[in-house]
Amino acid sequence: MRLHRNLVFAVVDALNFIFNEGEYADKVVEKVLKYDKRWGARDRGFIAETTYEMVRWKRLYAEIAEVKAPYSRPNLFRMFAVWAVLKGIKLPDWKQLEPTPERRIKGKFDELSKIRKYKESVPDWMDELCSKSLGEALWTKEIHALNEQAEVILRTNTLKTTKDNLSSALHEAGVETESIKGYPDALRLKERSNVFITEAFKNGWFEVQDASSQLVAPYLDVKPGQRVVDTCAGAGGKTLHLAALMENKGQLIALDIYGNKLKELKRRAKRDGAHNVETRTIESTKVIKKLYDSADRVLIDAPCTGLGVLKRNPDAKWKLQPDFLDKIMVTQQQILQDYSRIVKPGGKLVYATCSILPQENIQQVKKFLSTEAGKDFNLIKDDNIYACKTGFDGFYMALLEKNPA
């Protein structure tokens, strides 16, 4: 591979925004890719993938390059040189990359690869917390799996088409896919490509949704004609899955504290032909109180540390702070206490997170069940989904049932 100056400089710019200015990787990549309209798919792919890879392995590369935050431009070029050497890419004769001690880089890499927090590139506090919570063996396997690049998984929108039809349409558009055993509506892309420009996407035949995330809506056991409430709907990936499982029959109320996310959900619902979705912004407690004891099914896809989705959000490793866990656990319990009241007698509730920590998962459920608000509920089943076992995101789901009146 030959390195091109303008592409490498774009990567260094991106890293500066992410590491020094605290911007989010996905937004930064979007911004940097607009620098030059002449860049083709390969150029854009190089910038996006190299940026993400360097964010993922930031601690390891910084340690080998012997640089510390805040990173100056020469520091960022040193980290880039480490990336290139470890990839076996010949470094060009540029003053920004001189001199690069290749043998020392490889030696240091071998040495640091024996220590998990460097090898898997995580902050000390995260390594300690997760190994304590999950046990050394599981955490070692899990963080290794979470450092692999996320695959692109599609969910067939069964309101509009079948999985086979979707696969054929994408094949005609030059996108090859395959089914995944145990995930009825999922298709995996054999090679990364921009699926958003396909007719199938414009026609609302699919959504991009990780395979683990596709397990949550079916867990709620919805039936056509029910009243279902998705309490932390966001931009609606799981809401739209619920709409499909309900076959557009019944009422699906999507709630969120962020109105702009619900606007995006409305747009997506229109494209997907999901007509039974109604959005409501939680502007006060009244919105929730109006729904007390009224829903057959309630989904709480709770805010969390997001430690299960580091594959697709590697910058979360550096953005998360140790005290965030304590704060979010208070929020999670509050949400369980408040939103569980929407479930009518005999109804069901799913509590889900994209975290792998028991503190945010089973421990929250047990705590809830021991309170006044939770005394009428029973835990039917729960599942921990680990990246090291499935290859997809880490998730947690618990199904609770409320006693009949």
Image (cartoon, rainbow, N blue to C red):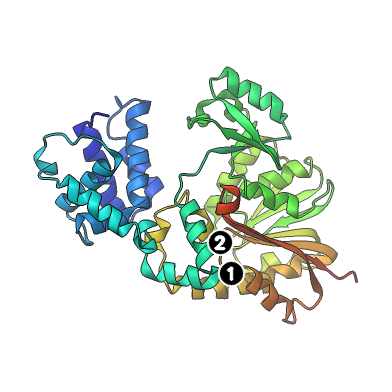
Q: Which is nearer the eye, 134 or 289?
A: 134
| Residue 59 image point, x, y percent | 31, 58
Examine the rendered structure and indicate whether residue 194 appears above or below residue 356.
above
Direction top: furthest residue: 172
Give left or right: position of 59 versus 293. left
Q: Which is nearer the eye, 164 or 302?
A: 164
Direction right: furthest residue: 405
- What secondary structure is marked by label 1? loop
The answer to whether residue 399 is seen in the rendering is: no
User: How many labels sit on residues?
Assistant: 2
Give left or right: position of 191 versus 201. left
Q: Which is nearer the eye, 204 or 356?
A: 356
Q: Quadrant of residue 186?
A: top right
| Residue 7 image point, x, y percent | 25, 34
Give left or right: position of 297 versus 72. right
| Residue 244 image point, x, y percent | 73, 41
> Residue at label 1?
360
Q: Residue at x 59, y 17 (%)?
A: 172
| Residue 195 image point, x, y percent | 52, 30
**Crowdedness near tag 1: few (<14), some (14–19) or many (≥20) residues, C-alpha within 10 Å:** many
- Picture disc at residue 355: 2
Q: Which is nearer the eye, 366 or 158?
A: 366
- What secondary structure is marked by label 2? loop
Q: Residue at x 53, y 20 (%)?
A: 174
Asked if disc 1 and disc 2 are in contact, CB closer than 8 Å, the reply is yes
Q: Amino acid at mark 1?
A: Glu
Give left or right: position of 73 versus 45. left
Q: Amino acid at mark 2?
A: Ser
- Picture disc at residue 102: none
Question: Label 1 vs label 2: CA separation?
Answer: 7 Å
Examine the rendered structure and indicate whether residue 223 appears above or below residue 284.
above
